[in-house]
Amino acid sequence: MKALVTGATGLVGSHLAEKLIERGDQVRTLVRKTSDTSHLAEKPIELVYGDLRDYESLKKAVSGVEVVYHCAALVMESGAWKDFYQINVLGTKNLLEACLSANIQRFVDVSTVGVYGVRSHERVTEESPFLPSPSYYTQTKIEAERLVDEYYREKGLPVVIIRPTLIYGPRDRNLSARVGRLLARSRMVLLNGGRGRAFFTYGGNVADAVILAGTRNNIIGRSYIISDDRVNTWKEFLDLMAEEMGVDKPGFSVPASLVYPLATVAEYGLKILLPWRPTPPLRTGVKLLSINRNFDISRAKNELGYVPRVSLQDGITSTVHWLRDCGIIGKSVE
C-alpha cells in the first residue's frame, strides 16, 4: 500500500511512518523545507516538499497515493489565531480537496479529545458533544473535524477520525519535554495533591491505532477515541517519570481553587501589559492538571481491534531515554 503521512517530523507522524515501513508499505511524507528530517534520512521514505497552505504542493503529494494519514497540525500553547486557522483548518481543507481530486481510498484525520472540552466527566464516548474551547489549537481542531465530516457526508470522501488523549513519548517536545525539565529542576508542583485523573497515550500506541484506522474494513465515517486504557492520576505519572529520571518525586502541592484565580489574573494582566504577545492559556493548564476525566475506548477495541501494546512504565522508560539523548534533561548519575 502507498501512504502519505503529513506531520512525519512530529510525535505521532514519525512513529507512524516507521511502523508503516515495518509493514512493508511505500511511505511518502509531506515536509517543509525548514523541517528537521534527520531521523527520516536513512529510511526508505519519499520526501515531498510542500505546505498545507500550498494547494499545488498537496496535489503532487497525494498523486498515486492510496491512503492519507493527516497528522500535521500547529500544536502550541499560545499563538496567533490566524496561524492556527490557516494551518489546522484551511490546511486541512486544502488536503481534503486534493484527496477528493485524487480519488484516494481513505483519509485518516488525527484530531484530539480536546474537542470534548477540558472539564471533569465520568465517561466520554465518541458521541459526546463537542464544547467550545479557549484554546486556539483545540477550537481549530473542532473546525477541522467538521470539515472532514462535511467532505465525507456531502462529497463522499472515505474518512476515519482518531482522537487521542494526552500523548507522550519519544519526540514529544510538548508534554514530555516540559515535565522532564520541571522534574529535573525540582520545580514540578502538584495541584490538589496530583489526584487529578488523566488518560495518557504513548505515541507509538497512537500510531498503531492510526494504521488500524487506515486499513480496517467497514469503518468509513467513524471516529475513535484512543488512550492507553488505563486511568492514572497526575501524581502516578509524574512519580514514574521521576523514578526513571532518578530525581525526587514532586511533593509540594497547592489547591487548584487557589491557583485558578491567580491564573485568571495573570492571563488578563498579560493581555493588558503585553498585548502584542500571545497569552498562554494558564487557566486551561490548571484545569487540565486538576480535573477528573474518563474516556471510553470500547469502540476502538471492538471495531478497530485496538489494544495498546506499550505499557505506561515501558513508555516512560523510552521517553526518558530520548529526553537524555536529546539533552533535554541531563545524563543520569550512577
Image (cartoon, grey):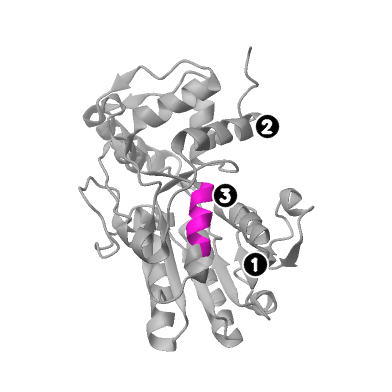
- What is the distance, in whole Å, between disc 3 and disc 2 at their CAs? 16 Å
Q: Is residue 138 above or below residue 310?
A: below
- What is the distance, in whole Å, between disc 1 and disc 3 at their CAs? 18 Å
Q: Give the residue at mark 2.
A: 325
Residue in front for this viewpoint, 300 or 80? 300
Give the class, few, some or many, for how many residues have Cα within 10 Å of label 2's Cα (few <14, many ≥20).
few
Give the class, few, some or many, for how many residues have Cα within 10 Å of label 3's Cα (few <14, many ≥20).
many
Residue in front for this viewpoint, 170 or 61? 170
Residue lying furthest right in this view? 42
Q: Position of residue 55 (x, y in %)?
A: 62, 77
Q: Secondary structure at mark 1?
A: loop
Q: Give the residue at mark 1.
A: 51
Residue in front for this viewpoint, 102 or 312? 312
Which residue lies at the image location 61% right of the left edge and 77% below the top edge? 66
Q: Give the residue at mark 3.
A: 11
Residue 248 visible: yes
